[in-house]
Amino acid sequence: MTAQLEDTFGRRVTYLRISVTDRCDFRCVYCMAENMQFLPKRELLTLEELDRVSTAFVRRGVRKLRITGGEPLVRRNIMSLFRNLSRHLKSGALDELTLTTNGSQLAKYATELADCGVKRVNVSLDTLDADNFRTITRWGRLDQVMQGIDAAKAAGLKVKINMVALKDANEDEIVPMMRFCHENGHDLTLIETMPLGEIEADRTDQYLPLSEVRRRLAEEFTLTPLMDRTGGPARYMRVEETGGRIGFITPLTHNFCESCNRVRLTCTGTLFLCLGQDHAVDLREPMRQSEGDEALDRAIDHGMLIKPKGHDFVIERRNARPAVARHMSTTGG
């Protein structure tokens, strides 16, 4: 049996995030430049290759697969990948198959996702105001996303809303978003903007520390810390007045590296060992060298050896350049 995945700091890697495309039908101001240069399609892993490398990780002890992008549901024939990967759920080798989406295509795919064994989805939604939604996403339509959320709920999918907290852009909408989520049975996770990739905006103007958000919330609500974890970096609290959960992902004010159990595969086959570092190994070439997985396993093992202890995110005026040059859509969040 091939060895389970463990890095040099003794952390077991049980969670693989897979970016199936760098393309997206939105252009969120904190994530992308408006005029993005996307990868040529010939550079992408095929859906069959994405299945093969995912299966190699499952064989090595990964228990959770998250499909991401860009926007994963804009990739042509993407549901064939979900259908194929669902066999690992049926065999018991995989605990969870899920995805992060902007919600634009959920109305079309929610029922099929549920049929593939997907139990929950993360939907990125930063505002409930249609005009502000258009401002933040540049190209998006709020009504389309809301229809997707409704379709996901109707299909039996558990929905978690991810909201990036943006200074002056949506900070006054956090409480209304929390109330909306909890009234509809959704968890809400707040996320600090991350210094990934060159964008037109100045991230020092966008950055809103969640320590400040939490302080403000605590003035109005009773927040009870929870031990709940979903395999990711969020730290959860129960809002006693609403009965719902709110999570905080704080890569800047309080990093979550000590418990990191995840790695990220890009749509070109590059395995990034940390969201905020450039440590990476190529899996595409070893995978294509032979029909067997020996070379692929060796490359994955090398990745475990170079996985860093943590990231070095910082946002400040004198260090305005991004921590890494690649955009979030390239790495897959």
Image: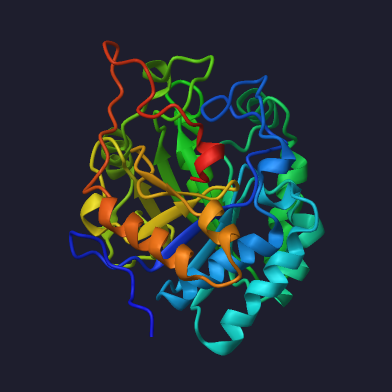
Residue 169, above or below 297: above
Residue 212 in percent (x, y) is at 28, 33
Residue 255 in percent (x, y) is at 25, 44
Residue 20, above or below 137: below
Residue drawn at point x = 62 percent, y = 38 percent: 128
Residue 126, by quadrant, is top right
User: Relative to 44, is 270 on the left or the right?
Assistant: left
Residue drawn at point x = 74 percent, y = 49 percent: 75
Residue 295, above or below 44: below
Residue drawn at point x = 29 percent, y = 53 percent: 222
Q: Which one is nearer the viewer's eye here, 254 or 301?
A: 301
User: Relative to 220, is 30 on the left or the right?
Assistant: right
Image coloring type: rainbow
Residue drawn at point x = 27 percent, y = 50 percent: 306
Residue 51 in view of the camera: yes
Task: Single out the residue that lies furthest toward the front.
Answer: 289
Task: Single out the residue that lies furthest toward the left.
Answer: 9
Residue 240 in percent (x, y) is at 35, 60
Residue 235 in view of the camera: no
Task: Single out the residue that lies furthest toward the top.
Answer: 318
User: Relative to 11, is 220 on the left or the right?
Assistant: right
Q: Quadrant of the N terminus?
A: bottom left
Q: Which one is nearer the viewer's eye here, 226 or 44?
A: 44
User: Relative to 203, is 292 on the left or the right?
Assistant: right
Q: Which one is nearer the viewer's eye here, 222 or 296?
A: 296
